[in-house]
Image (cartoon, coloured by chain):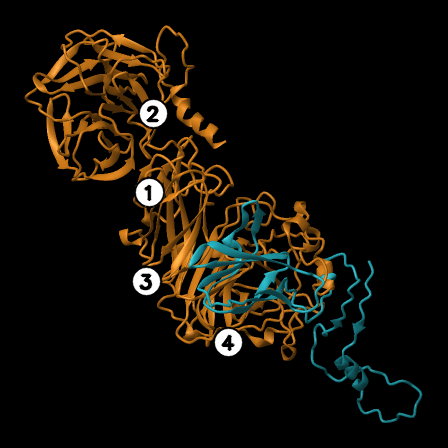
Chain colours: A cyan, B orange
Amino acid sequence: MKLTSIVLISILNLLIVACGGGGGESDSSTSTPPVLSTPDPVAPIVDAPVEVEVDPNATYETTAELVVARAFIIEQEYELTVSYKNDNNLSAYLSVCTEFTEGKSGIKVNYNSCLLRTSIESDYAGTLKVANDKNRLVMAIWYLDDTDNPRYEIWENDSDAMEVRKFEVN
Amino acid sequence: MINSARKKTVKGILFAIGMGSASLYAQPFTECPTEAFLIQDKLANLYGVQLATGFYEKSSPADWNQQKMNALAFSIHDQYLYAFNYYFGTIVRIGADFQVDPISLSNLPNKGFYVGDISVVENAYYLYRPGGSFGLFRVSLDASSEDYLQMENVVNGTTLNLAIYDLAFHPDNGSAYAVDRWGNLWKIDVQAGTSVKLSNVGESGTFGAVYFDVTGNLYISRNNDGNIFRINTNWDYPVAEFFAYGPSSSNNDGARCALAPIVSQDSPTTDFGDAPDSYGSSINNNGARHDVGDGTLFLGEVVLSEPNAYADNGSDVDDNDGIQFVTGVEAGKTAIVDITSSADGFVNAWVDADKDGEFDADEQIIISEAVSVGSNIVAYDVPTWSETGSTWSRFRLSSEESLSPIGGVSDGEVEDYQIDIAEQNVTAMHYPSADTWATLAFEDNWPLVGDYDMNDLVVHYRLSSYDVEGTLMRVKIEGEVVAIGASYHNGFAFRLPGLLRSEVDTNRLVFKINGVEQSILPLEEGKDEAIFIIADDLWDFVTSGETCKYYRTEAGCGSNVQMTFSLEIPMEANVSKDNVANFPYDPFIFSSAGQERNYVFGEAPGRRFEVHLKNQAPTEAFQSNFLGRGDDVSDADNGEYFINANGMPWAINIPYEWQHPVEYMDVKYAYPDFHSFVTSSGELNVDWFTVEKSNTNNVFKQ
């Protein structure tokens, strides 16, 4: 096991040590270090908050030892902004879903797998939370006046992308 | 596969003994069959009929070469069929192998009989023919009786004068029943030769085949249209209810074993819906049902048969796969469905738009729509007066053009879907998607570090929000409690951060547990925030298995999920969606009242104890000085909550139907990639939670 965490002694503890044992001894010239036999009463901190720093390369035998960045809330989704430009302001229905098949007869969407379903009569823009294991999404647009010709657009996640992911359909 | 299974069930009974075997004697049936028998045509054909659906199939061999027969009867005493055979001019016994043996009778009149049945309480065959020279006759089939095979006239046809075409014996009261051409139901005392009119059933015609089931329901089949009606003879004034579309015929007689239920429990051939029974789903409520038939006409990719609605179809396959709601269902707007059919047929469909638990005539959204093999796009209008929220829809496919939402039919399939009727122009957002689960996994030993098997409480859930141009209309929370791997008593709740209690429209709020609407308001009293208490103590709703400590966490301790819940939360006007937190809102556990926790608390902390997801602030009910006790290092000033010194939380949220670790199994050994996901702050192994990445030996299996 390699535990390379850097332990930061809290400032509070340092202060306690620095101030400790002040009790009346005024002869600071002596070379004898002060004896800290009767430290001032301090707040009864049962487990002093010891912040452990994250080492991304560390490995741990058990989850009890695992160290997590405090700000990382262990979120398992990524944000995806979705937009559709409805040039002619057609009355349509837009869905963004995760399950679909591409076969000879075209794309078949499982509409039970949708994250977003909305009527639109103009442009649409919104933000979705997508599960980390979902890397391909389909946008299905059904035009209420032309039910024979739905439109499908597929988006694929680039997991290396640094910026906010965007699924834009014009 | 379906085809072959189907053949087995239908033919299995009749072909119990191999066809064409030249046995000396006809062979009896091996059991009391659930199907009815129907004999028709001048050159006789014997059919098996599923009364539940009207499905029928010719059973007799093509080269049977038997002349017309009538007055068909099934004897429960020797398990043979009997009939009056016009060629032999006497009664015959018919075996399961279709061998026909004539039986000589003494005192036989010189005319044929087309009405008859064998009593259940005595081994005697009763035959009827109107007219002064005829009437009701009795033939003893009991070889030990003195009058064996002697025909005796019980009463003449002038005294007992009935315009009936078949009769059937009640399963236990000894009387025969018949419905005459005007719809009068007669109860016939066959020993006294008298009859009593019980009621007029409300349907008239020639009922050439009538049958009983074991519960005292009389089924009557009308010759001209084949419609089968059910009459509950236990009622004070029995009336006919339409039951199924059956075979029509001009020459018709039926019989069945009156001691059998009408749907086989062992080898069912019927597909049922699964909407709640107020819609008519089970056989008792004359539910919508389809015979799987010859297996050629169904919705989607598959249809499976089951003994009744809600019964297990014997596989893990969900055969509700034929309808895709390609648009949402919005009150007063056009909606579109994609119907996948296996062959040509007709679709009729209903939506319970007023949410009264029934499919009414004005709720039929698709009427006799012809569909063909493959995908069929069908647009329909959603009633303007629809109530928003969760409701049920029913889709029926059949070769029958016109169907009602209940009753049986001889082919096709019924599929029921729970759907959501939305306001016009609504935007629905779902987490993790419209029909998948996310998972909450809690360690409940807070503020002490637990064992990280992450199964002290495991809840599957999904969330939906509905807004119209930024105004939040509704929120839906659905879920199921899948595991409790600890003995502490926890309540479970959702707070919707940013939403005030006063902004919830409590009058329209619907809270269900295990599908049953609850009378208590889940919105917590006395709080400013909107907090929804799903349960004060989850152990009130689930039990550990026999010899198991916990609920669904130990090997060999599987059980069905014992608690599901759903909450529909409508808002008062003008709640801005932007003011309310994003998914997953704020799910949390709290301590049940009066239940002890660990030593950190001097007394039972009750509602003051909460555990939330990492860095989620507790609610106003929480006792804030609990923070920092034990291993907790929350720092409210920095927005850090429910974490230990290593930054680890006591709860995680996974947008996936996660298989939790078995009891005492460190999550690392169930999901080896979890650690690197965490240490990389979410950069690596982002799909660590999937079943493909699990160590299958270390996760709980049902």
For the question of whether residue B216 can be seen, the reply is no
The residue to which callout 1 is attached is: B287
In the image, B203 versus B139, the foreground residue is B203
Residue B503 screen position, x and y as percent? 42, 74
Q: Amino acid at mark 2?
A: Gly
The residue to which callout 4 is attached is: B579
Q: Chain of mark 2?
A: B
Q: Chain of mark 1?
A: B
The residue tagged with tag 4: helix, strand or loop?
helix
**Which label lies toward us, 1 or 2?**
2
Image-quadrant location for residue B239: top left
Q: Do the dots labelled 3 and 4 sit on one chain? A: yes
Label 2 or label 3, whichever comes before in sequence order = 2
The residue to which callout 2 is attached is: B48
Label 3 or label 4, whichever comes before in sequence order = 3
> Dot 3: within a 10 Å radius of its alpha carbon, few (fewer than 14), some, or many (20 or more) residues?
few
